[in-house]
Image (cartoon, grey):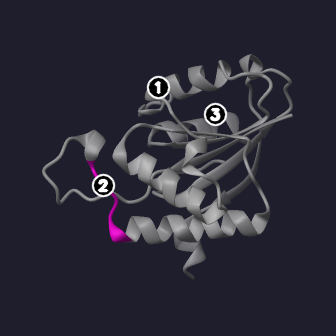
Amino acid sequence: MKSITIIRHGKSSWEHDVTDRERPLKTRGINDIKLVANQYVKAGFLSESIYSSPANRALSTCKIFLKSLKISENKINVVEELYDFDGRNVVDFVKNLSNDVNDVMIFGHNNALTSISNIFGDVYIDNLPTSGLVKLNFDINEWKDLKQGTTEFIIIPKELKQ
């Protein structure tokens, strides 16, 4: 059994004159990430390995999330291939993970994460919003055999505010 928890970066700010990679989070993004992370903690899940896109907004999301989980930032693996918007690089990255690892957490971008949720999960998502989280489970022993699995749960920040 293998599991992937994917988290889309928090809402980012367009108010700064920086490159796409350097765009920071907005205050709303930071608050939404904390809400989602707290809900994840309540569900009692932890991941063995944590991977993040190098983009500022994704890496910042990862750090805020891990702080809520009381996990050291030293556990973050920054992976260039996760700065991906269509999902092919993310899927290739997952298929090449060590089989010693069974449960991973990936912080990244759309449209990649919505596509991966729909291709590999069994619950259709129109759009994974910023700070959204999806946990997918797979009945496989090796990552290279990645195929459709089941969507264990979805956390959407807007739904936590109701």
Above or below for 143 versus 13: above
Of the pair 15 and 50, the residue shown nearer to us: 50
Q: Is residue 36 magenta?
A: no
Above or below for 158 versus 62: below
Q: Residue 162 vs residue 79: left or right?
A: right
Q: Which residues are magenta?
A: 23-27
Proximity of marks 2 and 3: CB atoms separated by less than 8 Å = no
Tell me if mark 1 has few (under 14), some (14-19) or many (20+) residues whose alpha carbon lies within 10 angstroms of its own.
Answer: some
The secondary structure type at the circle numbered 2 is loop
Magenta-drawn stretch, dominant element (helix, strand or loop): loop
N-term-proximal mark, 3 vs 1: 1
* Residue type (three-letter) at the residue carrying disc 2: Pro
Q: In this rendering, does residue 72 appear at all?
A: yes
Image coordinates for residue 4, horizontal then vertical, percent:
70, 40
Image coordinates for residue 5, horizontal then vertical, percent:
66, 46
Tell me if mark 3 has few (under 14), some (14-19) or many (20+) residues whose alpha carbon lies within 10 angstroms of its own.
Answer: some
C-alpha span from label 1 to label 2: 20 Å
* Residue type (three-letter) at the residue carrying disc 1: Glu
Which residue matches tag 1? 81
Q: Residue 72 vs residue 10: left or right?
A: right
Which residue matches tag 2? 24
Image coordinates for residue 126, horizontal then vertical, percent:
53, 51
Which residue matches tag 3? 119
The secondary structure type at the circle numbered 3 is helix
The secondary structure type at the circle numbered 1 is helix
Image coordinates for residue 70, horizontal then vertical, percent:
65, 61
C-alpha span from label 3 to label 1: 19 Å
User: Residue at horizontal 54%, vertical 79%?
Assistant: 161
Above or below for 157 versus 4: below
Q: Nearer the viewer, mark 2 or mark 3?
A: 2
Above or below for 111 versus 45: above
